[in-house]
């Protein structure tokens, strides 16, 4: 009986350590340890009520600077919902420039532009052409190759 306990104890410890490591990695890559601030900066309403949103992620300790991104929702999201979209594939566009403006050409076409034209292609992390039936066009924003 004692030998059986000695053999199962290390196995149980290994299982617990692996399980906790998996949970920590999941939390790390899904924003649970991100202490940054998420804030809605601007919105634009489509003719059928969709809302295009420019939001900002900033952090006093960030090495890469502030990030500005675009998402579409049916209402203004809370900071927690913006954080969720940031880490769970809800972004249409993300870059390190605050020049973003949004214009709906019709209910199924959104134009994302840069007011001062200062978006550098290397700053662009996400750049989608389609989102949930909405075509996305870019004006005064370079195309980034190899992005979504």
Image (cartoon, helix red, strand yellow):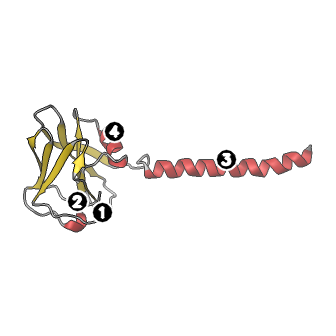
Crowding at mark 3 (Cα within 10 Å: few <14, some 14-19, many 20+):
few
Query: Label 1 near label 2: C-beta < 8 Å?
Result: yes
Mark 3 or mark 4, earlier in chain: 3
- The C terminus, quarter of image: bottom left
- In the picture, the disc for residue 16 is 3
User: Mark 2 or mark 1: which is in front?
Assistant: 2
User: Mark 3 or mark 1: which is in front?
Assistant: 3
Crowding at mark 2 (Cα within 10 Å: few <14, some 14-19, many 20+):
many
Residue 43, how many percent across, how many down? 15, 40
Residue 80, how many percent across, how many down? 33, 38
Residue 60, how many percent across, how many down? 31, 55
- The N terminus, quarter of image: top right
Q: CA distance from mark 3 to mark 4?
A: 30 Å
Q: Secondary structure at mark 3?
A: helix
Query: Looking at this rendering, what residue extends furthest in the right direction?
Result: 1
Q: Which residue, given by chain and number where applicable, does mark 4 sit on?
A: 80
Q: CA distance from mark 4 to mark 2?
A: 21 Å
Residue 72, how many percent across, how many down? 22, 41
Q: Secondary structure at mark 2?
A: loop
Q: Which residue, given by chain and number where applicable, does mark 2 sit on?
A: 96
Q: Is residue 138 left or right of residue 66?
A: left
Q: Which residue, given by chain and number where applicable, does mark 1 sit on?
A: 64
Q: Nearer the viewer, residue 31 or 45?
A: 45
Q: Is residue 100 left or right of residue 96?
A: left
């Amino acid at each position: 009986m004692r030998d059986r306990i000695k053999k199962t104890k290390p196995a149980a410890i290994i299982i617990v350590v692996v399980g906790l490591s998996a949970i920590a990695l999941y939390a790390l890559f899904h924003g649970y340890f991100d202490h940054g601030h998420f804030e809605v900066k601007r919105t634009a309403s489509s003719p059928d009520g969709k809302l295009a949103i420019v939001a900002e992620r900033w952090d006093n300790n960030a090495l890469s600077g502030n990030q500005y991104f675009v998402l579409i929702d049916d209402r203004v999201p809370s900071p927690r919902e913006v954080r969720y979209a940031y880490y769970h594939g809800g972004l249409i566009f993300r870059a390190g420039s605050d020049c973003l403006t949004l214009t709906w050409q019709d209910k199924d076409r959104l134009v994302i532009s840069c007011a001062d034209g200062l978006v550098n292609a290397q700053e662009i992390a996400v750049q989608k052409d389609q989102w949930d039936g909405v075509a996305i066009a870019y004006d005064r924003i370079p195309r980034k190759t190899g992005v979504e």
